Amino acid sequence: MLLFALFACAPDADSAPPDSGVAPDVAWYGDVEPILTQSCSGCHVAGGVGGFPLDSYATAAPMAGAIADAVEARRMPPWKAVEGCNDYEGDPSLSAAAIKRLRSWSDAGAPEGNAADSAPGAPPSSVLPRVDETLELPVAYSPAAGVDDDYRCFLMDWPRAESTYVTGYRMLPGNAALVHHVIAYIAPASQLDEYRALDDADTDPGWTCYGGPGLSNQADAEWLGAWAPGGVNGEFPNGTGIPMRADSEVVLQVHYNNRSGDTEPDLTKMEVMVSEEVESPAYIQPWTNPRWLDGSGMDIPANSEGTTHSFSLADTWGTFQVHTASLHMHQLGRSAFLEVEHEGGDKSCLLTIEDWDFNWQRTYVLSEPVTVKKGDVLTVSCTWDNPTDEDVNWGEGTGDEMCLGTMLFSY
C-alpha cells in the first residue's frame, strides 16, 4: 500500500528573515495553524493515514515548502468527489486565499509567531467527539512470509454489558505499510461458537477469511465499519447509529498486502463512540453484483482501456434514507459512480469519482440524505484501464479488482 508523502527539507536557516522583533505578516499562530487543523490534521496526525503529523509548529515548519507545493497543485487535501454530483459535509478543499497564505508562510521562512495568537479552529469531522471504547487485535500479527495477500480475521470482545448504538468510529491501522483494508463485522451471539471454533482451529492468531468474516460473504455479513487507504472516519451523521447488542462481539477483518516485504507486526485498533439512544437506527450496506463475487462477469481484458461494468437493482424492501456514500476499487481503477434512478426518471447522484486514486478512499457524508423508495433503482458502475498482460477479474488480492459501493442508510 502506498501513502502520499511530501518530500521537503527544513527551511534554510540562512534564508530566514532576521529577527527584527516585528511580528511577521503570516505566521503559524493565527494564520497557518487554523488551516492545517481544519483541512489536514484529520489525516496528518501521529499514526494517521497521512503518514506524518502536521498538527504542531514543530512538525509543520520543516514541511512548509512541500505543503505549499502540494496545495497549489491541488494534490492536497485529497477530495475526489466530482463537483455537481451532490453536496457533502466536511470538504477540506482550500480557498485561493488559504493557499496564498500557506505559500506566503513558506516564502517567509515559516515563522512561528506568538503563541498567544493561537486559534486552531474547528477540528476536522474525522475526529471523534469522544472515544468510549477502543477495540484492538488480541495480539500483534505479522503476515506469513511469501504471502502477498493475507486476509485475517480476529474475534474481539464487545466491552459493553448493555445493548447500545455505535454512533461513530475511527480505524487506526497499526502498520500502514501492510494494511490494505479493514472491515469490522458484527458477530451475533448465535454465531459466536462457530467463530471461536474457527479461531481455535488455526494455529496462528485469528483465522483466514477471504470474501467475508468466514461464516458469510461480504454482502450478507452485517458491517459495523470499514477503512481503506486514505479513508477518514468519524461521527455518523443525522443522529444515526448502528445497533449493537450486548451479547454480540466484533470480527475485525484485516487485509494485509505484504509485497513490500515489511516484517513489522500490526496491531490495528478501532476507536468507537456509543450512545444509548439515537434518532434513527442505521446500517452499512455494500452494493455490488453478487455474481462478481464468484469471479463471473467482471472481466477486464489484458492491455485494455476503458472497460466498464455496472450493476443495477430496484429497491424492493421499502423507503430508506442514504446518509453517506463511498466507492472501492483497486489499482487499475479509472472512474466510478453510485447513483439512484427514481421511478419518475429523475436521478440522484450519490458519488462520482473521475480520477480514481487507490490511496485516497474516503467516505463522503451527504449534506442532505437521499430518499430511496420502492421501485427506485440503485446503480454502481466502475471503469478500469488494464495495461498489464494478464486478464483481471473480481478477486481478493491487490492485483485483482473490485467494484463496490457502500452506503450508510436508515429506515
Image (tube, rainbow, N blue to C red):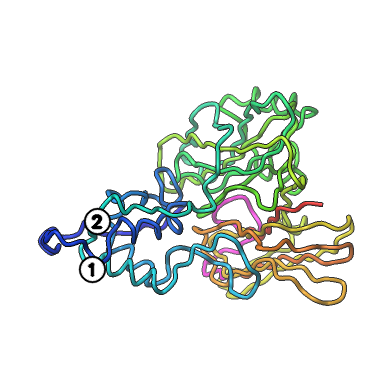
Give the residue at mark 2. Answer: 113
Left or right, 187 with reference to 1? right
* Callouts 1 and 2 close, C-beta under 8 Å: no
Q: Is residue 277 above or below residue 3?
A: above
Mark seen at residue 107: 1
On the image, the x and y values in percent for residue 366 come to 66, 62
Q: Helix, strand, or loop for circle 1?
A: helix
Dot 2: within a 10 Å radius of its alpha carbon, few (fewer than 14), some, or many (20 or more) residues? some
Q: Is residue 248 above or below residue 324?
A: above
On the image, the x and y values in percent for residue 335 come to 60, 70
Q: Which residues fall within the magenta stretch?
A: 385-400
Left or right, 308 with reference to 342? left
Spatial CA span between label 1 and label 2 = 15 Å
Q: Name the amino acid type tagged 1.
A: Asp
Residue at 60 percent across and 56 percent down: it is 363
Q: Helix, strand, or loop for circle 2?
A: loop
**What secondary structure predominates along the stretch shown in magenta?**
loop
Question: 121 or 17: nearer the eye?
Answer: 121
On the image, the x and y values in percent for residue 393 come to 65, 60
How many numbered discs?
A: 2
Q: Name the amino acid type tagged 2.
A: Gly
On the image, the x and y values in percent for residue 114 come to 25, 53
**Mark 1 or 2, nearer chain start:** 1
Dot 1: within a 10 Å radius of its alpha carbon, few (fewer than 14), some, or many (20 or more) residues? some
Residue at 65 percent across and 49 percent down: it is 236
Residue at 65 percent across and 63 percent down: it is 367
